[in-house]
Image (cartoon, rainbow, N blue to C red):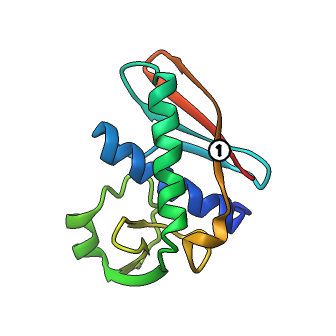
């Protein structure tokens, strides 16, 4: 794996992505920078989020963390994964017949090669620090406390 992601922060990114998909019917982020101290996700979006929407989004992620969801990994045939998931962000690996799917309870599932916690409660508390919107891109910055 080329990026040195922090498992807690990377797992929080998954929860944020699912919260965005569930609440706003958008796609998962198209770009993410995941660091141990602070991280950001960029979404194709039509407007900035209101303060209340940001608070609700943060509350949703923290609720999933507190549910202590098991984080599991499953290998799925590539042909099946293509039917279930958007694979444009999955690196092309020649000869790969299976994809690694990371599941967070029944809340989220997506292809991923990164490290994760074994349970969402290990993540800690999720905090949205700032957000911004420009030219159809919504950026959400967050940290763990």
Residue projecting furthest to the right: 37
Question: Which residue appears at 49% of the width and 50% of the height?
Answer: 16
- Which residue is at the front of the view, 79 or 61? 61
Question: Which residue appears at 53% of the width and 44% of the height?
Answer: 58
Residue projecting furthest to the left: 83
Relative to residue 133, is residue 60 depicted above or below?
below
Crowd rating for badge 1 (residues with CA inside 10 Å; few <14, some 14–19, many 20+): some
Q: Position of residue 30 (x, y in %)?
A: 47, 42
Res. 81 image quadrant? bottom left
Quadrant (top left/top right/bottom left/bottom right) for the N terminus: bottom right
Mark 1 highlights which residue?
127
Count of numbered labels shown in the rendering: 1
Relative to residue 100, is residue 135 depicted above or below?
above
Q: Position of residue 4 (x, y in %)?
A: 74, 63
Question: Left or right: where does residue 74 sit relative to residue 7?
Answer: left
- Which residue is at the front of the view, 58 or 134? 58
- Which residue is at the front of the view, 123 or 101? 123
Residue projecting furthest to the top: 135
Question: Left or right: where does residue 138 sit relative to residue 96?
Answer: right
Relative to residue 14, is residue 104 depicted above or below?
below
Relative to residue 26, is residue 122 depicted above or below?
below
Q: Is residue 110 visible?
A: yes
- Which residue is at the front of the view, 78 or 102? 102
Question: Which residue appears at 31% of the width and 47% of the height?
Answer: 22
């Amino acid at each position: 794996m080329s990026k040195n992601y922090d498992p807690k922060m990377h797992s929080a990114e998954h929860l944020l992505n699912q919260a965005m998909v569930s609440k706003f019917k958008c796609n998962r982020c198209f770009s993410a920078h995941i660091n141990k101290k602070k991280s950001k996700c960029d979404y194709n979006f039509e407007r900035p989020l209101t303060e209340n929407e940001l608070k609700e989004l943060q509350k949703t992620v923290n609720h999933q963390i507190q549910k202590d969801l098991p984080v599991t990994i499953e290998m799925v045939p590539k042909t099946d994964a293509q039917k279930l998931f958007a694979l444009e962000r999955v690196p092309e690996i020649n000869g790969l017949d299976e994809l690694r799917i990371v599941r967070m309870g029944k809340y989220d599932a997506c292809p991923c090669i990164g490290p994760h916690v074994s349970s969402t409660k290990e993540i800690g508390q999720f905090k949205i620090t700032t957000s911004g919107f420009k030219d159809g891109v919504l950026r959400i910055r967050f940290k763990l406390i």
